[in-house]
Amino acid sequence: MTAQLNNFDIILFGATGDLAMRKLLPCLYQAHAAGLLHPEGRILGVSRSKLDTAGFLEKIHSDSKIHIKTHFSEEMWQSFVRRIQYLTVDVNNLSDFERLAQTVKARTQTDNVVIYLSTAPKFFAPACEHLAKVGLNGSNVRIVLEKPLGTDLASSQQINADVAQYFQEQQIYRIDHYLGKENLQNVLPLRFGNIFFEPVWNRDFVQSVQITIAEQLGVEERGEFYDSTGALRDMVQNHIMQMLCFVAMERPKSLGADDVRDEKLKVVAALKPMTANDVARNVIRAQYTAANGLKGYLQEHNVPADSRTETYVAIRAEIDTPRWQGVPFYLRTGKRMPSRSAEIVLNFKPQAKPLFGANANRLVIRLQPDETISTTWWVKQVGSGLDVQAATMTLDMAQVSDERRAEAYELLLREVIDGRLNLFNRRDELEKAWEWVMPILDYWATTPDKPCEYPAQSWGPQEAKDLLARDGNAWLEDQQ
């Protein structure tokens, strides 16, 4: 196996931060424990914190090790941390980058260098400029950009332009961890690898599509950050858009990165643009209120009492392609929901001339907390006659294979090391997604309307139910 693995350096900017400690380092440990990293691959943690390697290892021992829930052994942990070095690097200090470059170039057998910018986007431009000045932008260098990539179209374009001055598009890996979820990736083989799905995956048979990301948590201690972000920026423009693309895209010419990403771009470009009237009619924004012993959003720490930031958004969208013309796509996300879930629901049309009543089939692809694919069928009731009842058949993906299922960040980190771009956003797709949400953000910025309200641990405001009822449809929890 070793001969098939790429020898690498991973440089983690922001190595003392929350993402590195909670996700990146634990995921790299899991890859190490599974034997999926080259034995000589090295991890260089860098940040402004004035630590040496011993001090950094003490920090990850206390702050990162606790997040490893499975496949942990002290012996394996000790072999993992031997990969790690630490350097103090200030993104505005060229001499720090010169020292970093000397450390990287001292190794002569490295196949590639992965630079992961787990920092605020305002540091991307100076970091990239200094990386280029010290020669850490060659063809064997790959740079990973952590979201958020901007707060609107203009800022996203600026970030992309800044990075593009120093790195080619094929070197840039814009990460969205939802693309690392196995069951989202599974949508493509489900559709294009099974003859009985693709013929009905269109406007002739599908009545509506629902895409939901629900979170049980509130904003917790992140009120200041969240209040400048909101649900639309935090979830819809990125994660939900990726789920939408996989559901709605056409068959790619091949499974090559650009062929797949070309088809995703076409989906985002075909989303019907919204006027102010469309936003008023087809977009619901809301905030959770105190209920069930939980605070309301306006009572959370560091949230202004007059905030209009949305913790919930529901959108009725349409895709103007021959496959989907006229089919409503309902997109929603919210905090303080009754349960944590991410799922795609295809509601099929009832038969035109039914023998057994106007019953309709349903397909549910669940990404979390479990990974399942469920179909609703109509079958005969036991006994005399031919009355029917609904039955659900569920495929639990955890039962399909005994193979270890990697967390999203682990899988994506391995994809970067191996140089595969399929599961990362291309610049044109990302900017097109921002272009589509901008009329919503612009409308909210200018309207005096306050967000709707929904009690904590509910499925959202009544207005979101009315949005679907207008078309004769209902959210999944109201269909059962």
Image: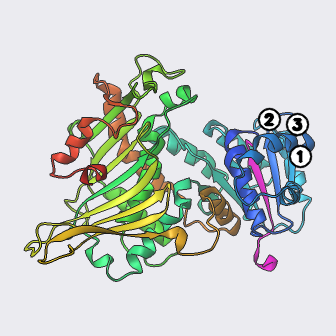
Q: How many marks?
A: 3
Q: Nearer the viewer, mark 3 or mark 1?
A: 3
Marks 2/3: CA–CA distance: 9 Å
Query: Does 389 sit above or below residue 48?
Result: below
Residue extending furthest toward the top: 305
Q: In this figure, which residue is indicated by the disc labeled 2?
A: 48
Q: Secondary structure at mark 1?
A: helix
User: In the structure shown, which secondary structural element does the residue marked by tag 3 occupy?
Assistant: loop
Residue 477 is covered by the magenta coloring? no
> Residue at label 1?
99
Q: Amino acid at mark 1?
A: Arg
Q: Say if residue 212 shows up in the picture.
A: yes
Residue drawn where x is 29% and y is 68% of the image: 391
Label of residue 51 in the image: 3
Q: Amino acid at mark 3?
A: Leu
Q: Left or right: 230 with respect to 124?
A: left
Amino acid at pointer 2? Arg
Task: Check residue 9 for magenta coloring.
Answer: yes
**Residues at badges 1 and 2 in contact (C-beta under 8 Å)?**
no
